[in-house]
Amino acid sequence: MSAAFVKRIEVRELRVAYGSKEVIHGISFDVYQNEILAVIGPAQSGKSSMLRVLNRTIDFAASAHWSGMVRVDGEDVRRARDVYALRRKIGMVAPLPVGLPLTIYDNVAFAPRASGLDDEHQLDQLVERCLRQAALWDEVKDRLSSLGTALSGGQQQRLTIARALSHQPEILCLDEFSIAIDPVTTMRIEDVLKELRRDMTIVLVTNLTQQARRLSDRTMFLWDGELVELDRTEVIFSSAARSQRTRDYVAGVFG
Amino acid sequence: MAIAPAPATGRFARTAHVARKERAELVARAVTAAMAAAMVLPLLLIVGHLVWLAWPSLGLGFILDVPSRGMTDGGIWPAFVGTLYLVGISLLVSTPVGVLAAVYLNEYARDNWFNRVVNLAVINLAGVPSIVHALFGLGAFVYAARFGYSILSASLTLAIMTLPVIIASTREALASVPMAFREACWNVGASRWQTIRAVVLPNSISGILTGVILQVSRAAGETAPVMFTGAVFYKSVERGNLFPYALTDQCMALSMHLYTLATQVPNVKESLPYATAVVLLGSVLLVNATAIGLRVFLRGRKKW
């Protein structure tokens, strides 16, 4: 059981602001090895901004600044010497499916190539493994050289997941991955996540409270940049939840 | 539950309000269509008139021949090839500078005072009249840089003139690439430059090229900047020779040749200036058509 409490991510007093508008008002939490941590909360509650701090892509937002401490595997991300290695350690799946305007193969091979892998044989193997993991291989194996953008929305979202797996991350963050895809595809991807959790730590930002309930070990409820409650998922989704706001939110009274 | 049938009085009957609305619609359509036609008509008239008057001189021989009888007869080869030189060299300079500057401004620059100054400079430079560019070129390249009156000076002057527009059109092309593509690349550990090379540039190249090509017509048509810095009244050149000039030579240019024929030379064969204008206009239209064709072709291959 002790392995289950290895801290992969530690966040302390995280504050994020765009210009003078603060969107996260000091939140603290940990993410443990091999768990699925669900982050629920309405739009504008700071969920996506929190993810962007984890892999420091918040750097690309000119007006953003943040304070507090974020550690990934004990290393302060602010002082990460190789920010690209940090980003490779954390797989990131965006809300809307983004097939890059490249071939399906190149979509998946992009990240390994960007980090210097150019051995064709290794790339072939890696592309196949990632597409299999994302449950897309059987549908695209005969047309790897056609455009990723030509796939359907659900396929593109699985392509996005394959791409996020291509740099062999240890932590996978998904930001409302099911927002643009149908329920059946969502279920397929949820099955994929259940497989992946065996070797990975997963942070699942979601608008669907029931999705959090189905998949996660622990659930964190963010509301307007504040952490309302973080507990075991069965607690959050029961009358034992401490906050009235949490009980109302998961019951669908608001949000 | 039964749905109540529409009243027999006719919910869709024509009322005074509807009649007024339809009249306004008709007027709006007629007026806008007339304005659109008014734009096409002058172009057709100009081209038709020019070709009509230029007809006796037109032909491949007219382009390949050199002027004869004290510029009152013959062809326009020295001017034609001179314009090719000026436009070609100026774009060779302004395209890489402009495109790379636009990449910096759109992909790297943050919102600080330095970049605001650069932006302001680009916008203002685009609004500077060509005669001012001509004087600048004269001072900067002919005298200060000691390039003398030469193709080099004139090309660089044209380059400075086209640069801001190339920067603006390139920025627009880059900005049309969805932000989500960049974020997807950054998320998997690609640097900005890797992202630009793999995704941003390949998907904005059609817009960038179109912007550059449209500057060809502008550079070819300008008279003042080349007249002040390197174009001359007459230059003896072999018929059909593609490489008659060195960088440090002065040259003839179509735009200036047209001006001289029309105003400076007495007893010119009547069709000569018109034929020169047709060649200048024809080349420009040809280049623009290429730009449109290229855009259609590349957009057909658009990947999202």
Image (spheres, grey):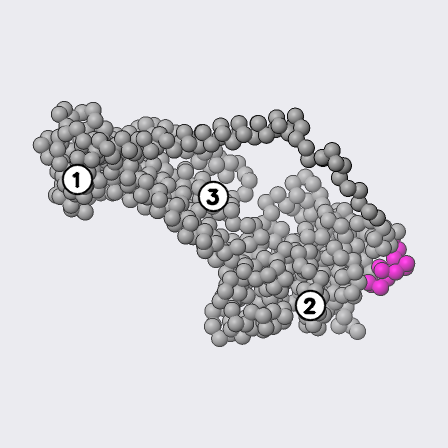
Residue kind at label 3, given as amino acid type: Arg
Residue tagged by mark 3? B171
Residue tagged by mark 2? A188
Q: Residue at x 86, y 62 (%)?
A: A235
Task: Specify the quadrant of the image occupied by residue B68.
Answer: top left
Categorize mark 1 by other alpha carbons within 10 Å: few (<14), some (14-19), many (20+): some
Residue kind at label 1, given as amino acid type: Phe
In the displayed structure image, the side of residue A120 where residue A243 appears, left or right? right
Residue at mark 2: chain: A
Q: Is residue A143 visible?
A: yes
In the displayed structure image, the side of residue B275 where residue A220 appears, left or right? right
Q: Position of residue B98 (x, y in %)?
A: 40, 43
Measure the C-alpha gap from mark 2 to mark 3: 41 Å
In the displayed structure image, the side of residue A55 where residue B5 appears, left or right? right
Categorize mark 2 by other alpha carbons within 10 Å: few (<14), some (14-19), many (20+): some
Q: Position of residue B136 (x, y in %)?
A: 32, 30
